[in-house]
Every structure is written in C-alpha cells, then in structure tokens.
Amino acid sequence: MAAAVEPRWRQATFIQDVRSRVSASQLTRFQKMYTEPFFVINVDPVVPALVRMRLTVSGSQQATYVVTLQSTGLFKCSCKDAIMTCRRNGCVCKHVCFVLYRVLRHEGLDFFDNLQLTPDEVGSIASRASQIQIQEVDRSNPPHVAPRPDQLHFDFCHSKRPHQIEAGDDCPICFDALLGSDVLRFCPECGNGVHRTCIVKWMEHRSTCVYCRSKLWSNYRGD
C-alpha cells in the first residue's frame, strides 16, 4: 500500500510559504489553526441562494461560529473578530483559515491576495464540503446521560469491531490525524474512531455518533 501523502497544511514548507505571502495580522490568525483546538460541529445540507457552503465550528469554549462561502468566492464568519476587525485589516479570521485549509484541504495561497476564491475553486470547495461525513442533527432526541457511565467505558475504548486506524485517516471533527494518537474512542455501533477530546466537544452540541447516528454516544461523559 502506498504511503499516505501528508495534506499540504501539515507540510513544513507550507507555513514558510504562508509567512512570506501574507500580512502580519493575517499570519497571526493563520497560525492559530496549528496552536488552538477547532472542531466542526455541523455542515448544513441545505443552504440559501448565493451560498455554496455553510459549516458550524467550535473552539475550546462552547461558543459556535458559522463559516459561510458565498457564490462570489468570499467567506463570512459570525465571530466578532471577522465582523469587527478582519474587514478593517484586510484579512480573514482563524475560523475561515481552519475551514479552508485544514478541513477542505485547499492548497493554493492566491486566496490571500484578494481574500476571494475563483469560480472554479468555489465549485471544488463546495463539492468537498458536501462530502464531509457529518450526520444531520437529530433534534427530537436530546442528549441523555446514563446513571452509570463507567459501565460503558470499555465499549467506547475498545469497540467490539473497531476499524483499524491507518495513515491518512483523519478525525471527522478536528480533521487532524488519528494515527499516532493513543487517546481514541470507538463507536460501539459502527466501530469508527475519534479523538477522545473531540467526541467530548461533539457531545456538547450533538447527541449521536458523528459517523452512524447511533445514540449510544449520548451516554458518554469523557471517560
């Protein structure tokens, strides 16, 4: 089996290329996608007219922000920095950087010249966003915490049929590598793995498995 190719954002030369290309204010925000935790909480399956993609992301706190790609190739984010500061400084916020380069694996740096994607890039990015495997929110079944979550610890740590983690497998919540992490949890229903910290963050906002919509995760408290 051929070795998995590291995504561009993880390659050592990428940050060097970014540093030589962008302003200081933009570089500060870009570098935060390496030093701060980010999680994708939702991908809207249906978006309004003139919108090609809309994702909900979260950080270390419980607050969530909506990142939107318009058909014009411009990004919007609902965070305070994007609304009040980035527009004035001619840059994009850390959430847009995370979504564009880490989640959607965009490789080009021409985006930073005008902070706008080309029509072809918009189509490509929207197509990738539609393939992200995050299940629709099930609002009819709110999370429920089991009275004895310790009884479920073994199942989440060692699913009865866990999928083998291989090079190139990324967490569907933070979009960082799964291989090499010894703190994983596996869905007892589908056997797919996620980072423990990611599923804890996920359960702050959702009640079902990120892969299969199993409700077993609603009993998980971060063991």
Image (cartoon, grey):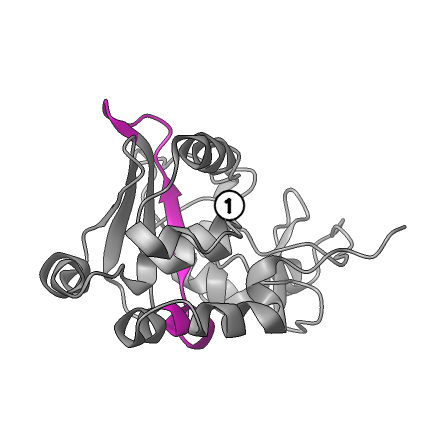
| Left or right, residue 188 beside residue 112 | right
Seen at 60% across and 71% down, the residue is: 13
Q: Is residue 2 above or below residue 181?
A: above
Of 4 and 187, the residue lying toward us: 4
Of 142 and 11, the residue lying toward us: 11
Q: Quadrant of residue 70?
A: top left
Q: Is residue 18 above or below residue 136?
A: below
Q: What amino acid is at disc 1?
A: Cys
Residue 172 image position (x, y, % from top left): 54, 51
| Left or right, residue 71 beside residue 215 | left
Seen at 45% across and 37% down, the residue is: 121
Residue 120 image position (x, y, % from top left): 45, 31
Residue 185 image position (x, y, % from top left): 61, 62
Q: Which residues are magenta?
A: 30-51
Question: In what element is the residue under mark 1?
Answer: loop
Seen at 38% across and 68% down, the residue is: 30
Residue carrying label 1: 209
User: What is the residue that sits farthest to the right in this orientation?
Assistant: 1
